[in-house]
Image: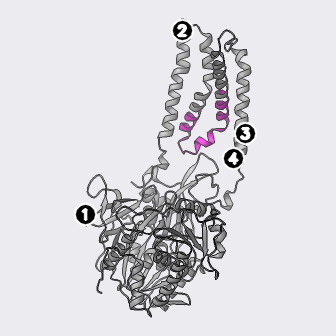
């Protein structure tokens, strides 16, 4: 196939679609269920959307949020925003309202495009202008005031106007906003064109939802080359098997030539068996770690004539990436029997580096100067090997996948009902038709991993919960029996076996405050009983007498806080996951740091300064012990527990 490059100077990515609408207006642009939209019809729909946005005052460079679940409506809105001169921010309308409002507050779009069904959820502030694309009447401003002065998300310097702002997946932290310029999209389109050879005859199946970065990549790849974009119809199939069957039917019925999907979808298609007698010529798989044996199995299922590519990128470096395609001959061997994930070589116009301590060693992957948050190494054959996300249990997950009965899996942390026990749990999805023995899988992982890297348990699950973007939904992982979803929990939502009642936070605060006040009162009462006249300030002139009284009050409060912490502080410290003896030592040290001031100062005040035996006893009883206690608390805060040392070495 011939490769056609698009000039970069001042090129806007939506102009690629406009060019095809002018040259091939009757060619199919989008197919979604019963909807079949030609390039000419798409051009008219985009023009209508752009006119509507201009009528509500969308200016060049302004940001418009697209909060739509229907992929055709979402794509039309995105292209309309671009044609009106703005930049789009795609968001999932099913996002929890608090999270959606936080994102809208951070991005501060000029207008929100949504459906009437989601108007209330998308209205994060009274003056936010909301336009419902399914309303027949003129767009209505949800507030009675004039639109606010908008703020756009700036593109990187000297990279051209911003085309879209994409939300990161938030795998290891909170999702972030990433501006992507028209220049980035055109460069990416040219790189994909050069590697994959797209042309107007291709029919592209893309299963990603509109809010994902993969959806933007999908329409740029398909419509930028004059091809047809084939979109699954809605969310009719929630069960994995039905979803896979519907996708296979779409590929066959619409004579698809290109499939772009996530790793879970690729595994599902592999498990459902051979898919022959199709026109597929290319399958690209991205999103999660994908092992070499899985890539082989998918190629076997689709037939030897289909190119199967493991594609790698991150939203933060959109358009830059790497790819690995299985060669026709013998694939590169796996080493030491451990599963290998190869992401190959960089795309054209991508500068890729692995910043390890030396050649061939593990290090962070950098794409075009952007730290991806992933680790890899460049092998002796020049191919890049993916070694896992930083902050995840990559080595344990490779060991889990190495068991013959495990089709997919995940290793993560969960909190048990006892606060001091934070466990590392492996979730294993069995191979179709096989019974998975969790004890045998655990033994296999223990033989492979070092002692401090082994999971505490293996939990068989029929499948891993997924988000609409085909990512693992860690918040909804089923919890093992005896665990609970406490704050900071990384395993999942509250399960039936873990719904233990918890005291409200407000009640806990009140209870701690009561204990501290009670012991502070006891300290005040017993001061004169144990150390008569130690707090007598009758002969001290003002204002120093008042200052000393404040000091004595603080000592009583400190003692009360220390005693309260002695009674209720241990569970909170135990959540850090240190050994029991270390947690106990740190707990008692913190108590001593707070409580010791009350007896120490009273004894010092009543001891003569020349009474050297008594002074030395006080120094070694209090001063030295307080220094030692501070050292223990500092070590407790600074040292990472063994179980928490990430297993990505």
Look at 36% across and 71% down and name the residue there: 183
Mark 3 or mark 4: whose residue is earlier in sequence? 4
The vertical placement of 269 against 619, above or below, is below
Q: Which residue is mark 2?
A: 613
| Mark 1 burial class by Cα count in 10 Å: few <14, some 14-19, many 20+ | few
Cα distance between the residues tagged 3 and 4? 10 Å
- Tell me residue 545's x, y (percent): 65, 16
Residue 90 at least partly seen: no
Mark 1 or mark 4: whose residue is earlier in sequence? 1
Q: Which residue is mark 3?
A: 511
The vertical placement of 542 against 35, above or below, is above
- Give the residues drawn in magenta, as a range: 559-587
Mark 2 or mark 4: whose residue is earlier in sequence? 4
Residue nearest the viewer, comparing 326 with 443: 326
Cα distance between the residues tagged 1 and 4? 55 Å
Cα distance between the residues tagged 3 and 1? 62 Å
Asked whether, in this view, residue 224 is left or right of residue 406, the answer is: left
Look at 40% across and 89% down and name the residue there: 22
The vertical placement of 30 against 54, above or below, is below
- Tell me residue 463's x, y (percent): 55, 70
Q: Secondary structure at mark 3?
A: helix
CB atoms of marks 1 and 2 within 8 Å: no
Mark 3 or mark 1: whose residue is earlier in sequence? 1
- Tell me residue 634's x, y (percent): 49, 35
Q: Which residue is mark 4?
A: 505
Q: Nearer the viewer, mark 2 or mark 4?
A: 4
Q: Which residue is mark 1?
A: 380
- Tell me residue 403's x, y (percent): 45, 66
Badge count = 4
């Amino acid at each position: 196939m011939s490769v056609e490059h698009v000039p970069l100077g001042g090129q806007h990515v939506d102009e690629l679609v406009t060019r095809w609408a002018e040259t091939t207006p009757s060619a199919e642009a989008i197919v979604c269920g019963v909807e079949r939209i030609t390039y000419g019809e798409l051009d008219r729909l985009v023009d209508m959307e752009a006119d509507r946005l201009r009528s509500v005052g969308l200016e060049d460079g302004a940001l418009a949020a697209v909060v739509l679940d229907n992929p055709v409506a979402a794509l039309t809105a995105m292209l309309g925003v671009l044609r009106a001169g703005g930049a789009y921010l795609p968001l999932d309308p099913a996002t929890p309202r608090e999270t959606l409002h936080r994102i809208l507050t951070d991005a501060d779009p000029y207008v929100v495009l949504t459906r009437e069904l989601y108007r209330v959820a998308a209205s994060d502030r009274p003056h936010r202008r909301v336009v419902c694309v399914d309303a027949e009447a003129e767009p209505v401003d949800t507030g009675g005031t004039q639109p606010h002065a908008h703020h756009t998300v700036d593109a990187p310097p000297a990279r051209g106007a911003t085309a879209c702002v994409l939300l990161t997946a938030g795998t290891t932290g909170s999702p972030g906003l990433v501006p992507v310029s028209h220049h980035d999209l055109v460069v990416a389109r040219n790189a994909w064109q050069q590697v994959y050879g797209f042309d107007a005859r291709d029919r592209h199946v893309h299963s990603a939802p509109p809010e994902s970065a993969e959806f933007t990549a999908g329409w740029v790849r398909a419509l930028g080359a004059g091809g047809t974009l084939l979109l699954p119809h809605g969310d009719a199939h929630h069960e994995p098997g039905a979803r896979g069957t519907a996708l296979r039917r779409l590929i066959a019925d619409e004579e698809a030539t290109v499939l772009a999907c996530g790793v879970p979808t690729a595994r599902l298609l592999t498990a459902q068996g051979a898919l022959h007698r199709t026109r597929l010529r290319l399958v690209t798989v991205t999103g999660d770690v994908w092992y070499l044996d899985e890539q082989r199995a998918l190629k076997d299922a689709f037939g030897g004539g289909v190119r199967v590519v493991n594609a790698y990128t991150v939203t933060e470096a959109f358009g830059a990436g790497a790819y690995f395609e299985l060669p026709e001959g013998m694939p590169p061997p796996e080493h030491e029997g451990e599963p290998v994930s190869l992401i190959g070589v960089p795309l054209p116009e991508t500068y890729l580096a692995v910043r390890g301590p030396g050649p061939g060693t593990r290090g962070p992957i950098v794409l075009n100067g952007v730290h991806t948050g992933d680790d890899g190494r460049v092998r002796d054959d020049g191919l890049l090997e993916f070694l896992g996300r930083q902050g995840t249990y990559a080595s344990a997950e490779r060991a889990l996948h190495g068991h013959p009965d495990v089709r997919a899996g995940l290793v993560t942390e969960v909190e048990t009902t006892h606060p001091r026990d934070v466990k590392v749990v492996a979730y294993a999805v069995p191979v179709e038709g096989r019974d998975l023995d969790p004890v045998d899988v655990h033994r296999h992982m223990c033989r492979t991993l070092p002692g401090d890297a082994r999971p505490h348990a293996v939990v068989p699950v029929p499948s891993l919960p997924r988000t609409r973007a085909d990512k693992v939904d860690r918040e909804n992982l089923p919890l093992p029996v005896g665990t609970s979803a406490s704050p900071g929990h990384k395993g999942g939502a509250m399960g039936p076996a873990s719904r233990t009642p918890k005291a409200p936070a407000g009640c806990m605060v009140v209870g701690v405050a009561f204990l501290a006040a009670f012991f502070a009162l006891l300290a005040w009462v017993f001061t004169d009983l144990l150390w008569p006249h130690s707090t007598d300030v009758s002969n001290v002139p003002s204002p120093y007498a008042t200052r000393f009284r404040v000091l004595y009050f603080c000592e009583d409060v400190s003692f009360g806080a220390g005693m309260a912490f002695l009674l209720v502080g241990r569970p909170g410290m135990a959540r850090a996951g240190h050994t029991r003896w270390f947690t106990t030592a740190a707990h008692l040290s913190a108590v001593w740091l707070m409580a010791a001031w009350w007896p120490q100062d009273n004894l010092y005040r009543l001891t003569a300064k020349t009474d050297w035996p008594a002074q030395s006893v006080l120094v070694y009883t209090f001063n030295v012990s307080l220094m030692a206690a501070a050292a223990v608390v500092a070590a407790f805060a600074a040292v990472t527990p063994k179980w928490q040392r990430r297993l990505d070495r």
